[in-house]
Amino acid sequence: MLKQYTKIIIFLLSVWGIPNQVNGEQGKPRPLIFGILPFMSPITMFNRFAPLRDYLSHQTHYLFLLETAPNFAEHLSRLSQRRYDLVLTAPHIIPLAIESKDYQVIAVSRDPIIACVIVTPESPIHTLLELAQKKVAIPPETSLITMIGRDMLMNVGLIAEKTPQYINFPSHNAAYQAVLGGQVDAAIVSINTLPSTTVAEKKFREISQHKIMNSIGFLVAKDLPIELQEQLKNIVLNMEKESQGIVTLTAIKYTGFQNSQNIDFDDMQHYAKRLKELELMPNPSP
């Protein structure tokens, strides 16, 4: 009987693991918090990334809880508190997460982030210069797409009296809808964030785009057991080699992830600094 119980205990340990850093009450493994940047509505976010949460839980035998935040400020606050065990976040936020000393980069999306300036198909506007003093919808000021989009227009000379009338919207999709509804003359959005049906139907026309070299990145908490950190990295990097991993990638609308490290995001320091200037690093939430 003792042998039988011993085998059961060994089996459970091999399945769930017992590293101190992930132990909860009574030595049981606590849930791991998987944080995601709030770049779409919470419902859309959870529906899209639930398959990835489930895949990670299945592969590691740890329970993962999916969490987003109501806004960028709260997302940054939670990062500064080391709330997350695993994080999927924007490239201009990654330097701030690294700066906190709590996280390190393990992977980056193979899919580039593309900032686009769009108009309706029938719009008379065909160049960025024609947007002088026009109404341009933008996602929140904290968005990397907004920062880069503003730079795109400034770089062609749309400054001072030629500056467009930027109108903030709560999301990329809201900015896109503003163009369709005739509220604005153009919008700066990330094509990556729009529904695939929207992109396929081509209800908009691009007049300019900028491909961002850095993409969405995965970070892991450095105080997790090294073995678990390595396991998470290997799982993420090898999803496209495993049948259920491919299914999961399709569900979350990514083609895959590649190896990356902290230094790869050094060129995002400029945009991270601009985030700081927006005073988005509040005191930790209660």
Image (spheres, rainbow, N blue to C red):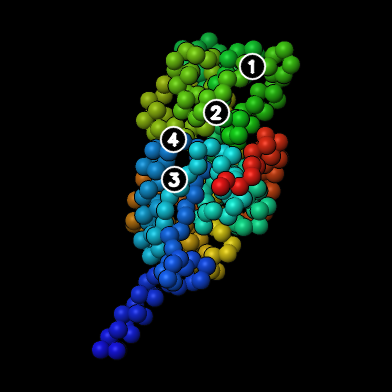
Residue highlighted by disc 4 = 41
Quarter location, residue 279: top right
Q: Nearer the viewer, mark 2 or mark 3?
A: 2
Is 251 rendered above or below residue 1? Answer: above
Q: Amino acid at mark 4?
A: Ser
Few, some or many C-alpha atoms within 10 Å of disc 1 (few <14, some 14-19, many ≥20)? many
Distance of mark 4 from mark 1, alpha carbons? 27 Å
Residue occupying the point 60% across, 13% down? 134
- Is 124 drawn above or below residue 114 in the view shown? above
x and y percentages locating residue 100 in the rendered image: 66, 53
Alpha carbons under labels 1 and 2: distance apart = 15 Å
* Location of residue 138 in the rendering, given as x and y in whole percent from the top left corner: 56, 25
The residue pinned by badge 1 equals: 164
Q: Is residue 127 left or right of residue 276?
A: left
Q: Secondary structure at mark 1?
A: loop
Q: Give the residue displayed 52% in from the left and 32% down from the top.
A: 190
Q: Which residue is mark 2?
A: 139
Q: Which residue is mark 3?
A: 254
What is the x, y in percent for residue 167? Answer: 57, 20
Mark yes or no: residue 157 visible.
yes
